[in-house]
Image (cartoon, rainbow, N blue to C red):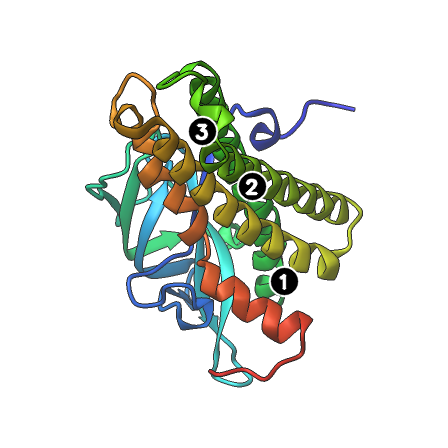
Amino acid sequence: RGCPPPLADGSRLMAFGITEPDAGSNSHRITTTARRDATTGDWVLTGRKVFVSGVDIADATLIVGRTEDARTGKLKPCLFIVPRDAPGFERRPIDMELSAAEKQFELTLDDVRLPADALVGDEDAGLLQLFAGLNPERIMTAAFGIGMGRYALSRALEYARERTVWKTPIGAHQAIAHPLAQAHIDLELARLMMRKAAHLYDAGDDMGAGEAANMAKYAAGEACVRAVDQAVHTLGGNGLTREFGLAQLITASRVARIAPVSREMILNYVSHQTLGLPKSY
């Protein structure tokens, strides 16, 4: 059977670069371009990426670029593997307020020359390959948000059971108990949608997985933000201290709403793809 590929067993790491300063969530506006060198057959990439994590520890970065279709003259998305030490490939850390293990980087590709086999898969199937990777990313982000929300909720419950101001623990009061119960319900509903998305993806149902993955990511982001907010509110001033470890989640929980795709873009997807409503753009 042989050994698993290095990316599968974790011996090699790869980052992923798609977001650009002027494109945002619109992958059709990506301006990083790749052109063929007619003499050597090499690819030459030029462009910029932002908010790319893990570049400092990755062996290579999977860059989403665009090539020109010889038949139509239009640019089409393609995927390229760029080694970390490729000449012309530079990274600059972005100063983030968010406290996280992974740092964020801005990437510059200045005529980065790559061999012909740096192109991943088929040039004509770049868009399909791209979205095949985006669905599990949304599922992973949903899991991230749900985990964060469940952690915040657990700290709030522990505090609400023990903290006594008058005769009973504060968790006995509905003003505390009901919002925490609602946060638990929201997180459980998001978890079920995430499991559905993962099941459909594993079953090879690309259409169903795309819809469910987007819904799971949306539900998890909303549930996470509400759970963290209620946890901090339950602890009061203690919720903003380092001792209880919740204050930094106020910033971190927002990631579940805005990355790797914003909640508004997910609502666009559901309204167009699921409900069949016309586009506004």
**Which disc number belongs to residue 182?**
2
Position of residue 121 in the picture relative to residue 227 (left or right): right
Q: Secondary structure at mark 1?
A: helix
Q: Secondary structure at mark 2?
A: helix
Cα–Cα gap, marks 1 and 3: 37 Å
Amino acid carrying label 1: it is: Leu
Of tags 2 and 3, the one toward the viewer is 2
In this rendering, is residue 169 above or below 221?
Answer: above
Could you tell me if the residues under marks 2 and 3 are in contact, i.e. CB atoms within 8 Å?
Answer: no
Q: Quadrant of residue 167?
A: top left
Q: Position of residue 151 (x, y in %)?
A: 48, 26
Amino acid carrying label 3: it is: Ala
- Give the residue number, with chain letter if any, for mark 1: 128
- Give the residue number, with chain letter if any, for mark 3: 152
Q: Position of residue 277 (x, y in %)?
A: 62, 81
Could you tell me if the residues under marks 1 and 3 are in contact, i.e. CB atoms within 8 Å?
Answer: no
Cα–Cα gap, marks 2 and 1: 38 Å
Of tags 2 and 1, the one toward the viewer is 2
Using the rendered image of the protein, determine whether residue 112 is visible from the camera's viewpoint: yes
Position of residue 250 in the picture relative to residue 199 (left or right): left
Q: Secondary structure at mark 3?
A: helix
Position of residue 229 in the picture relative to residue 266 (left or right): left
**Which of the image's four quarters has the N terminus?**
top right
